């Protein structure tokens, strides 16, 4: 089992879904975990259960992050939202928010954490991307654009951080059993003109060879391995966990 004793991990969106699963797995491996989330009450609840800290933060307010200094051996960029709409109807403010939250804030958090990581000669940047970081789907222009950008940011971080003992990788799951995915079902049914019961088999899982949702704990298990010493030579990579979707 990976031993992360003495390591400090910051997990964004850590109060629910993939982020919470990652926080719990990192804490189980011995890391001290900081739960960063817009929902301060939920962050405090999870942090208390794990013996960690809560950080209530609006990552969409990127101006407030410009001068941030972040103490983290492990940074998990996970926070995100979704909006399903045709491009011609996509609200520009919503598009900009998604890019701020899912691309600009990871950049600013990495920027804030790297000096400390460089000083220690150790760092792990783990970016929760998506199969939509390497593939596209209709009606998700902002999400796909943000995730594609995150993939590039992760690779640049890997190249710059390598000489300093810092690795950077992306995890690219398909649809994960989270509140974010569950909230999409009605929107997907609306834009595709189908009943909600048909969204999973006809939209979300149509490209996957394995016809089920990814479980948050499965994503977290890979994040913990990437955070540990055995993954020291793994950097600039994108790990798909999509049931075969991207094999097509």
Image (spheres, rainbow, N blue to C red):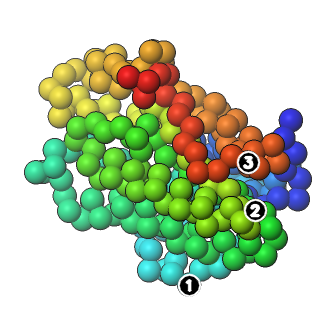
Q: State the residue in front, 57 or 124.
A: 124
Q: Earlier in the sequence, mark 1 or mark 2?
A: 1
Which residue is depicted at the point 34% across and 19% down? 206
Horizontally, residue 123 falls left or right of residue 138, namely right
Q: Position of residue 164 (x, y in %)?
A: 74, 67
Q: Earlier in the sequence, mark 1 or mark 3?
A: 1
Q: Position of residue 20 (x, y in %)?
A: 63, 45
At x 19%, y 58%, the residue is 91
- Left or right: residue 21 versus residue 94 is right
Numbered label attached to residue 233: 3
Q: Nearer the viewer, residue 214 or 229?
A: 229
Whether tag 3 and tag 2 are in contact, CB under 8 A, the answer is: no
Q: Is residue 107 above or below residue 77?
A: below
- The residue under label 1 is 67
State the image quarter where residue 98 is shown. bottom left
* Quadrant of the image occupied by residue 186: top left
Image height check: is 111 above or below 34? below
The residue at the point 81 percent across, 53 percent down is 31
* Disc 2 residue crowd, few under 14, some 14–19, many 20+, Cα 10 Å: some
From mark 1 to mark 3, how far is it between C-alphas? Answer: 31 Å
Residue bearing the label numbered 2: 165
Question: Of callouts 3 and 2, which one flags the residue occurring earlier in the amino acid sequence?
Answer: 2
Residue 131 visible in the shown view? yes
Give me the C-alpha separation between circle 1 and circle 2.
24 Å
Assign a secondary structure to mark 3: loop
Secondary element at image label 1: loop
Q: How many marks?
A: 3
Circle 1 residues within 10 Å: few <14, some 14–19, many ≥20:
few
Q: Is residue 25 visible?
A: no
């Amino acid at each position: 089992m990976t031993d992360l004793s003495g390591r400090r991990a910051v997990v964004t969106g850590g109060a629910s879904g993939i982020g919470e699963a990652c926080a719990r797995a990192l804490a189980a491996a011995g890391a001290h975990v900081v739960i960063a989330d817009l929902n301060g009450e939920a962050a405090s609840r999870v942090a208390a259960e794990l013996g960690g800290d809560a950080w209530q933060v609006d990552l969409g307010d990127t101006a407030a992050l410009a001068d941030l200094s972040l103490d983290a051996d492990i940074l998990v960029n996970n926070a995100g939202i979704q909006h399903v709409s045709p491009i011609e109807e996509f609200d520009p403010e919503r598009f900009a928010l998604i890019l701020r939250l899912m691309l600009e804030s990871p950049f600013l958090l990495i920027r804030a954490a790297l000096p400390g990581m460089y000083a220690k000669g150790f760092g792990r940047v783990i970016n929760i991307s998506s199969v939509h970081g390497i593939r596209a789907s209709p009606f998700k222009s902002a999400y796909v654009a943000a995730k594609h950008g995150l993939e590039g940011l992760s690779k640049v971080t890997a190249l710059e951080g390598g000489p300093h003992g810092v690795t950077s990788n992306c995890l690219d799951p398909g649809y994960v059993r989270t509140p974010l995915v569950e909230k999409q079902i009605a929107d997907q049914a609306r834009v595709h003109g189908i009943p909600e019961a048909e969204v999973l088999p006809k939209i979300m899982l149509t490209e996957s060879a394995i016809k089920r949702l990814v479980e948050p704990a499965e994503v977290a298990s890979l994040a913990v391995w990437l955070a540990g010493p055995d993954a020291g030579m793994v950097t600039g990579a994108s790990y798909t966990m999509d049931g075969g979707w991207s094999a097509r």
